[in-house]
Image: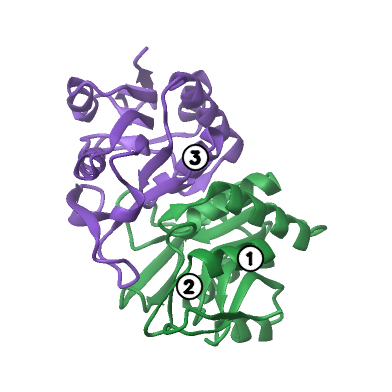
Chain colours: A purple, B green
Amino acid sequence: MELLEERIQKDGIIRKGNVLKVDSFINHQMDIPLIDEMAKEWKRLFAGKPINKVLTIEASGIGIAALVAREFGVPLVFAKKSMSINLDSNNYCTKVQSFTHNRIYDVIVSQKFLSKDDHVLIIDAFLANGCALLGLLDLVSLAGATVEGIGIAVEKGFQNGGELIRAKGYQLESLAIVDSMDAETGEIIFRH
Amino acid sequence: MELLEERIQKDGIIRKGNVLKVDSFINHQMDIPLIDEMAKEWKRLFAGKPINKVLTIEASGIGIAALVAREFGVPLVFAKKSMSINLDSNNYCTKVQSFTHNRIYDVIVSQKFLSKDDHVLIIDAFLANGCALLGLLDLVSLAGATVEGIGIAVEKGFQNGGELIRAKGYQLESLAIVDSMDAETGEIIFRH
């Protein structure tokens, strides 16, 4: 998606260790009109699919997914990290490794909000090694629900998450795929 | 707000220990049209204020705040819990006690996204003892920004957070204030 690629080129910050910071418009400050355009693009890409629910994982994905759910006219469910006393014990549960925070989370979704009748669009801000996404796919599978598609804002094409997920046959639509980036020159090469 | 009170009465679940679960429409599954109506109500309640940014704290608040930011036509900034390697060290930082998770978090916001020129509307899903909200107010104060108002979805009127915040002179608009609830009968009394 040209609009997003231009924005990453303009405001993304590359740090050593293949870190791409997009926190001025996606995951700390959110540029709402940009996200709304991204939601419209996913609406176009997943047209005709019987999507009745958007699923994401807290925290950075929630803002994007809320605007996507609004665009699709369906509820949003966000999977939660770790057990809270406010949640029922009747949950689907899986484990997700976070490299950013260097720990393993329990990720849960209530059985009340995901069932075999659901046709789910999974939305997340990032895809790198695919750990969070595999966790969400696991939750959908435990619920017996159907994955109609996966929408990612920024995919790191040089990590193997995208390949892994596409090999499973899912329609994965990343609006920007970064194939390489150079912390010295600031150059970013996108896949087209 | 009548629409929200009716929904809490219909789908809220009261548990012992004054726990009110609204996870079927606010903080696990989100009813997007309902949240959109709430955003419109805050737009009306804060009309004429020079709001240029919405501020919330991850995680449950983000979805609501994204739709509010959309309604106001301004960016959303969400404060983050705990330090991530993807964040700069140039942050405003405060500490927040979470009773739900029984721990103390570092809560941070980048100095890039909150400054003395900002006129902030703070949005969160819940207000009980006010710890999270006091943390956000602390971050705004550290940045030298101005709080134009505070919007809360559900306030527990029998805890002291609301009183504490109103005593400081802020325009605090809770769309539903629960004054009492009864886990046995399911009765909920709202403040008007």
Query: Mark 3 and 1 residues: CB-CB less than 8 Å, in contact?
Result: no
Question: Tag 1: Cα neighbours inside 10 Å, few (<14), some, or many (≥20)?
Answer: many
User: In whole angstroms, how far apart are the C-alphas of marks 3 and 1?
Assistant: 24 Å
Label 2 amino acid? Ala
- Residue B91 in sight in this render: no
Q: Judging from the image, what secondary structure is the residue with disc 2 in?
A: helix
Mark 1 or 2, nearer chain start: 2
User: In whole angstroms, how far apart are the C-alphas of marks 1 and 2?
Assistant: 13 Å
**Percent x, y of residue B187:** 53, 80
Question: Which label was assigned to residue B132?
Answer: 2
Q: Chain of mark 2?
A: B
**Percent x, y of residue B4:** 61, 63
Q: Chain of mark 1?
A: B
Q: Is residue B118 above or below residue B16?
A: above
Q: Residue at x 34, y 28 (%)?
A: A148
Q: Is residue B21 above or below residue A139?
A: below
Co-location on one chain, circles 1 and 2: yes
Label 3 amino acid? Val
Question: Tag 3: Cα neighbours inside 10 Å, few (<14), some, or many (≥20)?
Answer: some
Q: Residue at x 63, y 44 (%)?
A: B70
Label 1 amino acid? Gly
Q: Judging from the image, what secondary structure is the residue with disc 1 in?
A: strand
Q: Residue at x 26, y 24 (%)?
A: A170
Residue, disc 1? B151
Residue, disc 3? A74
